[in-house]
Image (tube, rainbow, N blue to C red):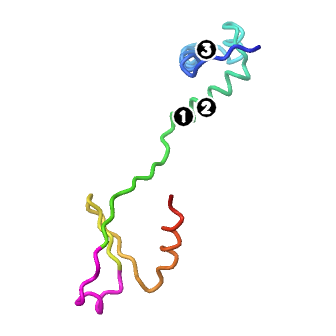
Amino acid sequence: MATRHSSEFWQAHLTAYQQTELTVTAYCIEHGLCAKTFYRWRSQLQAGSQPSPSLTLVPVSIQAPSAATTSVSSTAHLHSPAGWQIDLPLSNTSWLIDLLRQLP
């Protein structure tokens, strides 16, 4: 049965390999490693070090429009605590409603 090693084990070998002038095959032979496994771990560890896009949700409060703005405004104004603002026309909001319903 094959020996399983942790990601720390493979990260240490990847770091050590990068400090040599050996090929992956030569490094793996020298250290008794399977080159195919080394390549797989290298891909996984390098992919894990890439920053992934993240979604940040912010709290929302909904206020009923006042009588003065109901007849005048046909735009929804979204404001964040950080200061950004998005104005959405209310003429066709079905796409927005559908999108919000799909959120977990």
Secondary structure category for the residue under label 1:
helix
Location of residue 33 (image quadrant):
top right
Q: Amino acid at mark 2?
A: Gln
In the image, residue 7 above or below residue 92: above
Apparent side of residue 22 relative to residue 59 in the rendered image (left or right)? right
Residue 43 belongs to magenta span: no
Identify the residue at horizontal 57%, vertical 22% (top origin). Answer: 7
Q: Quadrant of residue 2?
A: top right
The residue shown at (58%, 19%) is 6
| Alpha carbon distance from label 2 to label 1 | 6 Å
Kind of residue sitting beneath label 3: Glu
- Quadrant for the N terminus in the image: top right
Left or right of 77, for residue 95: right
Residue topped by disc 3: 21
Residue under label 1 = 48
**x and y, in percent, of residue 49 in the image:** 51, 33
Tell me if mark 3 has few (under 14), some (14-19) or many (20+) residues whose alpha carbon lies within 10 angstroms of its own.
Answer: few
Residues rendered magenta in the picture = 63-75
**In the depicted structure, whether residue 23 falls above or below residue 46:** above
Query: What number is the disc on residue 44?
Result: 2
User: What x and y, as percent, mark residue 24?
Assistant: 68, 18
The structure residue drawn at horizontal position 48% and vertical position 40%, both measured from the top left corner, is 51
